[in-house]
Image (cartoon, coloured by chain):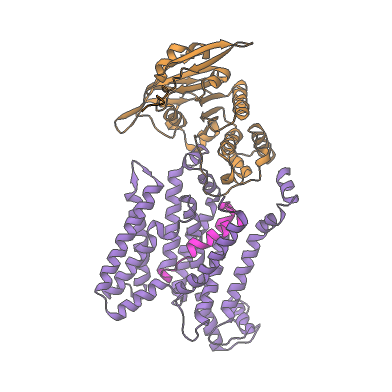
Chain colours: A orange, B purple
Amino acid sequence: MRLEARGIWFRAGRVPLVAGADVRVEPGEFVAVVGANGAGKSTLVRLLAGDLRPGEGEVLLGGRPLAEYRAAELALLRSVLPQQSRIEFSFTVRQVVEMGRSPHRGRGQDPAADARAVEAAMRAADVAELAERAYPGLSGGEQSRVCLARVLAQETPVVLLDEPTAALDIRHQHQVLGVVRGLAMQGRAVLAVLHDLNLAAAYATRVVAMHRGAVAADGPPAEVLRAEVLSRIYEHPVEVVRTGTPERLVVLPRHELPPALPTGTG
Amino acid sequence: MATRAETIARGAGAAWRWRLAALPTLAMLLGAAVLLNLVIGAVRVPPTAVLGVLLDHLGLPGVLEYTQQQEAVVWNIRVPRTLLALVVGAGLATAGCALQGIFRNPLADPGIIGVSSGAALGAVGIIILGIAPLGAWSTPAAAFGGGLALTLMVYVLSRRDGRTEVVTLVLTGVALNAIAGGIIGFALFFATDAQLRNVVFWQLGSVGGATWPNVRPAIVLASCAVLPLLRYGHRLNLLALGEREAYHLGVDTERLRLEVIALAALATAAAVSFAGIISFVGLVVPHMLRLMLGPDHRRLLPASALLGAAAIALADLAARTVVAPAEMPLGVVTALAGGPYFLWLIHRTRRAQGGWG
C-alpha cells in the first residue's frame, strides 16, 4: 500500500514547520528522512500518521485521503513509532507489545496468531528476555525497543518510525535497522526518520533530505548523501567518502576544535 | 498462549494466583460487608429474622419468624441504607478509576472534573436559600444538576478546535473548583447557624438519609454509569501508552475522553447528590487496587466497583456503630480509616519495589 503526501503545509501559529512537502513511500521501499533539527521531520511523520491535519495539500493512503479513514481502519493499515513513549502505569513489556495487536481484536482472528505475532515481534526487537519486566523500570534504549516491538506486532502494510535508533547502542542500531529493512523486503512501505547518515546510507533504499520544512533532495542514498547537498541542508561542512569492500558511503562532518588557550600569561 | 501458561506455572506464581482470585475475593468481601450491615445495628435483630425478612420480600413468605418491628428495621432502614452505600461506593470508585485512566494519572479523582464542587454548590445553594421547590428531592436534584453542569462547563471551556488537551482540562477543573469554592464560602457568609450545620454535615457525607424512594433513582443512575464504564478497560489500557499511541492503535481518543468523562460525572453526581461529599474513596480504592493487581484497567474497573462498594458499606457500619446511638459522618470514617491504611500501603510498596518503578 502506497503512502503519499502532496504539497502539504503545516504551520504552528505563523511559523511553517512543513512547507509544501511532497513525499511518497511505495511498498517494498525503506525511505530514510534526514535533515537538521527543526527541518520538519517529526512534523512530517505526524502529518503522514494522521496525528496532524495539513493546512494545505493532502495525504493519501492507498489513494484515499487520510482524513476519510476512521482511527480503527487506519490502525490496521499503518503503525507509528513516536519519538518517546512515557507510560505512567507499570504495564509489563509483554502487555505493552500485546497492545500492538489490539486493532486486530474482534476480527475473528485465531488467538494463537496474535500470540505468535507478539512473540515474533519481541524476538525481532530483542526484548523477549524483558517480557515480564515492568516498562517504566527499563532503560531508555530498552523502552525504545519495546515500543518498536509493539509497532512490529501491529503488522501493518505501512510503517512510520520517528528515530527508531536514537537511544540504541551500536549492536541494537544495526539489529533494528536490519529488521526494518526486512519489513521493506517483505513488501511493506517503511519510512523512518534517521539522524545517523551512515545508517541511512547503509540501510535505506531511498533518502529524503528535508531543509526548512521542504524536501531539498529525494533519491537513492548515493545521490542524496553527497557532500554539497549535506553541507547545504545541515549548514555545516560535510565530507562523504567511499570506502571498504563492498563499497560503503561514509559521511564525515568537518570539525574544528577551539583554539588552544594561551598559556603562561602574566 | 502457551507462554502465558508457562509464566503462570513458573510462578511469578503467588502474584498471578492472587490476581486471578482477586475478583471472587472482592465479591466475597462485599457479600460479608452487606451481611454485617443487615445484621448489626442499634436495634438487635437476630440473623434468622433478617433472613426471614429478606426471603419474605423475595417471594418466600413464612420460612422464618420475625416481628413487625424487625421487618420495619431491616426492610425500611437497613436494606435501603446498605444499597445506597453500595451504589455510592461503586460509583465513586469506578469513576475514580476511569478518570485516572483518562488523565493517565494515578492522582486524579472524581473531584478533578468539577463534579463534586458543582454538586456542593447546588446543594449549598438550596440549603442556604432555604427553598424546596421539589420537596425532599430539592437537595439531591440541585446537587446532581450542579455536578453535571460544572463538569460540562469544565469540558466546554477546555475545548478548542474540537480538541481537549488533558492539561487544559485539569487546569480548567482547578480554576472552576476554586471559583465554586469561593461562591460556597461567600454564600456561607450569609447562612444562619442551623444552615451552616446542615451544610457542614452534607459536605461530610452520609448514607443515613436512605429510603426506598430515593435509593431507587440512585441505583438506576449509578448503574447507567458504572455498568457502561466497565467496558472501557481495554481502551483505557491503550490510552496509558500515550494519546498519540492510542490513536495509532485505532482509538478515537477525543470521543473516548468525552464518553468516559460523561459517565464518570454521572456516577459521581449520582453518589454525591444522595450522600454528600465522601472524600477519598474515588482516589484511594482504585489506587490501592493498582498497587495490588497491576495496571490492567480491564480488571481494575470491576475490582474498583466491588471494593468501593464494600469499603463504603463497612465505613457506614462503623459510622453508625462506633459512637452509637449517635452517628459519625461517613466522610470522617473513610478519611480516618482509609488514610492510615493507604499510608501503610504506600510504604510497604515502596519498600518492596524500591521506588515507583
Name the quadrant containing residue A189. Answer: top right
B227 shown above or below B235: below
Residue shown at 51%/29% (left/top)? A163
Vertical arrangement, residue B41 with respect to residue A158, above or below: below
Residue placed furthest toward the left:
B190
Q: Report the residue at 52% width, 82% height from top.
A: B322
* Magenta range: B273-302
Image location (x, y in percent) of residue A264: 41, 26
Vertical arrangement, residue A43 with respect to residue B28, above or below: above
- Tell me if A249 is positioned left or right of A261 in this view: right
At horizontal 62% and vertical 73% (from top left) the residue drawn is B32
The N terminus of chain B appears in which quarter of the rendering? Answer: top right
Q: Residue at 52% across / 84% down in the picture? A: B72
Identify which residue, B282 or B269, lies in the foreground: B282
Q: Quadrant of residue A58?
A: top left
Q: In this view, does A53 lie to the left or right of B4?
A: left
Numbered circles on residues, count: 0
Q: Does the magenta stretch include residue B199?
A: no
Q: Visible in this render: residue B167?
A: yes
* Depth order, front residue of A205/B29: A205
Q: Position of residue A255 (x, y in %)?
A: 46, 19
Residue B284 place in picture, x, y as percent? 51, 62
**Quick one: which residue is furthest to the front in this view?**
A266
Please indicate whether residue A18 sits to the left or right of residue B32 in the image: left
Q: Viewer-proximal residue, A40 or A6?
A: A40
Q: Is residue A105 visible?
A: no
Magenta segment's dominant SS is helix
Residue B285 among those drawn in magenta:
yes
Q: Is residue B129 left or right of residue B228?
A: left
| Coordinates of residue A175 in the picture (x, y in percent) | 63, 27
